Amino acid sequence: MSIFEYNGSALVAMVGKNCFAIASDRRLGVQLQTIATDFQRIFKVHDKLYIGLSGLATDAQTLYQRLAFRHKLYQLREERDMKPETFASLVSALLYEKRFGPYFCQPVIAGLGDDDVPFICTMDCLGAKELAKDFVVSGTASESLYGACESMYKPNMEPEELFETISQALLSSVDRDCLSGWGGHVLLVTPTEVQERTLKGRMD
């Protein structure tokens, strides 16, 4: 078993019309044993920027602490919030810095940039960025998430339709992966508000 699969995870971010959604499962396991069913994988950077960290749970928490520290320093120096593209470059540089002893995390970054244009990207544990215009996935359920998102996604969805689409994609995908699941956690971000919802899924 790969170290990335040790705790199990499922992450997906999807773009809509001037909005985006980012969702994760809630299971924390040690291989096939479930430890917790309310684990947080999506972290807030600022009101319009979120990062999801799949992979090894301890590394995810450590990496988020380092990123939050870097972002606070940026806010103090620049007196503004970081743009999503800038933050993606920061994460990439931080990961590549540790390439000989990497954080076993695969981040998913989602944010609203200038003129509320949504930005999403993912990267591997060495910081190689993969940008997308529609959706990005990460975690042990990534293969089934690709299939579900490919079939369900359509461009320029309104917030409510986007929520429905990402929720159905997540729930149908984690049912096909025994290392992730136990409900879901969805954040829907528009220029004016952030909606946070918890999904109930199969509890096994």
Image (spheres, helix red, strand yellow):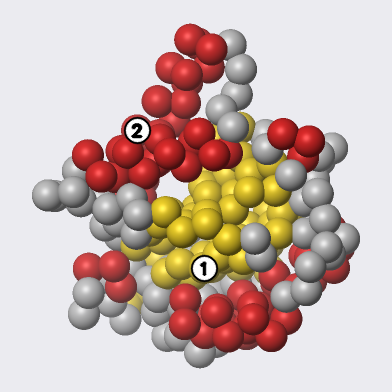
Viewer-proximal residue, 32 or 94? 94
Residue 66 marker:
2
- N-term-proximal mark, 2 vs 1: 2
CB atoms at circles 2 and 1 under 8 Å apart?
A: no
- Quadrant location of the N terminus in the rendered image: bottom left
Q: Position of residue 40 (x, y in %)?
A: 50, 54
Instruction: Please give the name of the residue rendered at 18% of the width and 49% of the height, measured from the top-left corner.
Output: 99
**Quick check: 96 above or below 87?**
below
Residue 27 in sight from this viewpoint: no
Residue 179 placement, left or right of 83: left
Query: Looking at the image, which is closer to me, 160 or 26?
Result: 160
Circle 1: element type: strand
Q: Nearer the viewer, residue 115 or 25?
A: 115
- What residue lies at 82% left-to-right and 55% top-to-bottom? 17
The residue located at (44%, 31%) in the rendering is 68
**Residue 182 in view (yes/no):** yes
Q: Is residue 186 above or below residue 183?
A: above
Q: Answer few, some or many: residues within 10 Å of disc 1's Cα (few below 14, many 20 plus, some between 14 and 19).
A: many
- State the image quarter where residue 107 is shown: bottom left
Secondary structure, mark 2, is helix
- Does residue 74 lie above or below 118 as drawn? above
Q: Looking at numbered disc 2 in the image, what kind of residue is underneath it?
A: Arg
Location of residue 190 (image quadrant): top right
Measured from the top left, where is residue 166 in percent x and y? Answer: 70, 70
The label shown at residue 137 is 1
Amino acid under disc 1: Val
